[in-house]
Every structure is written in C-alpha cells, then in structure tokens.
Image (cartoon, rainbow, N blue to C red):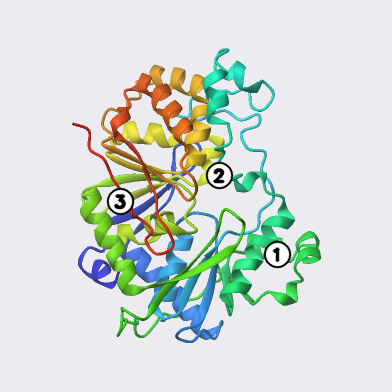
Amino acid sequence: MVWRATHTPDDRLFSVYNAKGAVIASLTCHQLHQKAERLGSLLQEKGNVKPGSVVAIMFMPGIEMVCAFYACLYIAAIPVLVRPPQQPRSSLLGVGGSSAGNTGTSTSGGSGGSGGIFGGSSLDLSASRSSLEPSPPPAQICFADSVTMAWNVVSSSQAVVCLTQASIIKLIKSKEAANRIPVVNWPLLLDYDETWRKKLTTVYQPHSPDIEVAYLDFTPSTTGTLTGVEVTHSVASALCRAQKMQCEFYPARELVLSLEPYSGLSASLWLLTSIYCGHHSILVPPHVTEVAPDLWLTLCSQRRIREAFCSYATIKLATIYSSKMISSMKLKEVTLENLRSLVIVSEERPRVNLTSLFTKMFAAVNLNPRVVSTSFGCRANLAMCLQCQRPE
C-alpha cells in the first residue's frame, strides 16, 4: 500500500455505486494511504491499541472498511471484519429494479408470486428454490439476532476496540440492542468519522510475514458454529498473487464486485486484491443489489467489464426478477458479451439449479454460459477452485 501511494498516488482503486447507478465514493492510492494514517493514529492514541491487539471493524460494505482495515495493518494491529447489526430492510418490496440509466423498471415485489414474474414459468424457478437455498440475507435477519451475531465475532476474537460509524454506535446503544447485549459488554466504540488530524510517524512493516497475523477471518459454518482463522501476511500475499496469476489482474483492468465482504475470498477481493494488483474495483454493495438487482449487470455492459465476482444471493435476485430486468436491459441495449469470467463466490453448497437457471435466462443478453463458474474454498485455502474460465 505504501509503495502504491508513493509511485501511483492518483490511480483509482475503488468506486462505490448507489442504486441509481451513480458513483457515491471513490478512493485513490494516496487517499487510502492518508486516511489509513489518520485512522491508525486515532486507534493508537484514543483507542490505546498496541501491536498485536485485535480491532473489530464494523462497517456496511464500502470503502470505509477498506480504510479501517489498512489503518490496523499500519500499526501492527489485527483487524477482524464484523457484519454490523442493522434494522431489517423490506428487500425489494415496492421498489423498482433501477439501473445505471435510472429508468426505474418496476417489479411486483413480494405480492405477485414467482409465477407472475416469470410469465407463468414456475417449474424452473421452483427448481432453483429447492433444498439448495442460500442463507438468508441480512435483510431477513431480525435486529436482535444481528446484534448477537456481531457480538459473537467481537467477543470470540477478543477485540479491544471496535471501529465503526456513529449510526452503528447508535444502534448498539439502542434499547432493543441493549436488551440482547448490554452496552457495557462491548469494547471501546470509536467513531470512524471523528475529526482527527494527527498522522502516524511510521508505518509498520512485518518482520516475519510467515508467522505474523495480518487479519482474522471469522465465518459461521453450515451448522452455525463460529470459527475463526488467523491469516498471516505471507498467506494473504500468496492468495493475492494466485488471484493475479489465475485471473490475469493488472492495473489497466476493471472488475465488478457484488458480494458481502466479511469473510473468505469475498473479503480478500474487496480489501486486498486491488492494492496488490493495482486494478480498479467497482463495488456494488449487497444493500444496493437488493434495491437494484440489475445494476451490476448494467455496469458490466456499460464499462465493458471482463471479470465480475458475485454471490449466490446476487444471482438469486437476478434470476427471480429476470423477466422485468431482461426486458429493460434489452431496451437499453445492455449486452454481456464482453464478460470473459463471471465467478460466483460460494461459501456454502453448490447451487447447480440456480446457476443453470441464471445462465439460461441471461443468455438473452448475450451471456456466454461458459464464462460462469463457481469458486469454492475452505478455511485453509480460500480459493482452491478459483477457475476464472475463458470462453473458447
């Protein structure tokens, strides 16, 4: 990161899009370095964070969590990503699948049933909704349970400080959250947006990357057991190097990410790969995809994206609302013919029926079925099956 901030300070690493297809935040190498320096100083002086201390990073998906992550690395602290507690959202109810053109294709939401969306073709949809359902998205998890989930990661990792935003701190201190987890049980809560002008005098460089822990990766298993893995600096570098070689990432590339970046390969793609490879990552947060399920595909067409990474939840939303989406995409001349690799980052069982249905539906906008693949991994190897297939 320090090298990129010095040699390529103006290179854009990240752009975050909203549901209207507008860039609401972006980050260059120099901006990321400056923000990480200030946050690192804040953690040291106000949070009393020492080298080797664990810091919980609790943000909605965006560039804030990237800055906080590197602030921890700059001071030799160990970050752990925590999905913040959040009030349930009425996912896709009464909202239009607005795209980058902001034309606002309307959907029938939850009232019409699946058959109406697919024009009577309910057989294939039922296949994708069989026993191979993805885990429920955060929008469907009750607030109290989301508080408990966040607390379990914070307590299991033994975090001494929680770096987050004022809105999330307010939720944690709310009466409903305090009834589940008392406020006094939480570690020190630091506000990311607090004005802090001091910078770090030195940036830490790992002396023994093979044994020094870079970050903690916590993820619940399919049985609900929470398991954490220590990821060393050398492992993180090897993972990024493997992605660079396998997917042919280099600074001139752009790729779209539409997934939850809290663990596994998703976290490395969101936080590490752009800095290691220098390419531009277009971030479409999950809460944006819930409102505009066609946005990430429209961006792939508009920017002639060759590589995209998404989750099964993203694929499911696109499939459910494909009838309305494809009609709108055809009117706007959206085409996916430039995609060379669309990787579904799987943290669970394979969803063969869902993937097959997605490729069949979006063949109408020139999606080549051969470009779609699924990446699998385990706690010891996050990307053992990162194929990045190339169509012949």
Q: Which mark is residue 172?
A: 1
Looking at the rendered image, the quarter that the C terminus falls into is top left
Residue 150 placement: quadrant: bottom right
**The disc labelled 1 sits on which kind of residue?**
Ile
Considering only vertical position in the picture, is 307 above or below 28? Answer: above
**Circle 2 crowding by C-alpha within 10 Å: few under 14, some 14–19, many from 20:** many
- The structure residue drawn at horizontal position 30% and vertical position 54%, both measured from the top left corner, is 12
Instruction: Please name the residue that numbered disc 2 is placed on.
Output: 287
* Mark earlier in primary sequence (3, 2): 3
Instruction: Please name the residue that numbered disc 3 is placed on.
Output: 280
Under circle 3, the secondary element is strand
Under circle 1, the secondary element is helix
- In the picture, measured across the screen, residue 375 lies left or right of residue 87, that is left
Looking at the rendered image, the quarter that the N terminus falls into is bottom left
Considering only vertical position in the picture, is 330 above or below 144? Answer: above
Q: Pointer 3 and pointer 2: residues touching (CB < 8 Å)? A: no
Q: CA distance from mark 1 to mark 3?
A: 34 Å
Which x, y percent locates residue 162?
58, 72
Q: Pointer 1 and pointer 2: residues touching (CB < 8 Å)? A: no
**Circle 1 crowding by C-alpha within 10 Å: few under 14, some 14–19, many from 20:** many
**The disc labelled 2 sits on which kind of residue?**
His
Considering only vertical position in the picture, is 46 above or below 338? Answer: below
Compare residues 255 and 150 and report the one nearer the observer: 150
* Mark earlier in primary sequence (1, 3): 1
Which x, y percent locates residue 173?
74, 66
Compare residues 151 and 187 and report the one nearer the observer: 151
Which x, y percent locates residue 43?
51, 79
Compare residues 245 and 23 and report the one nearer the observer: 245
* Mark earlier in primary sequence (1, 2): 1
Number of numbered discs visible in the structure rendering: 3
**The disc labelled 3 sits on which kind of residue?**
His
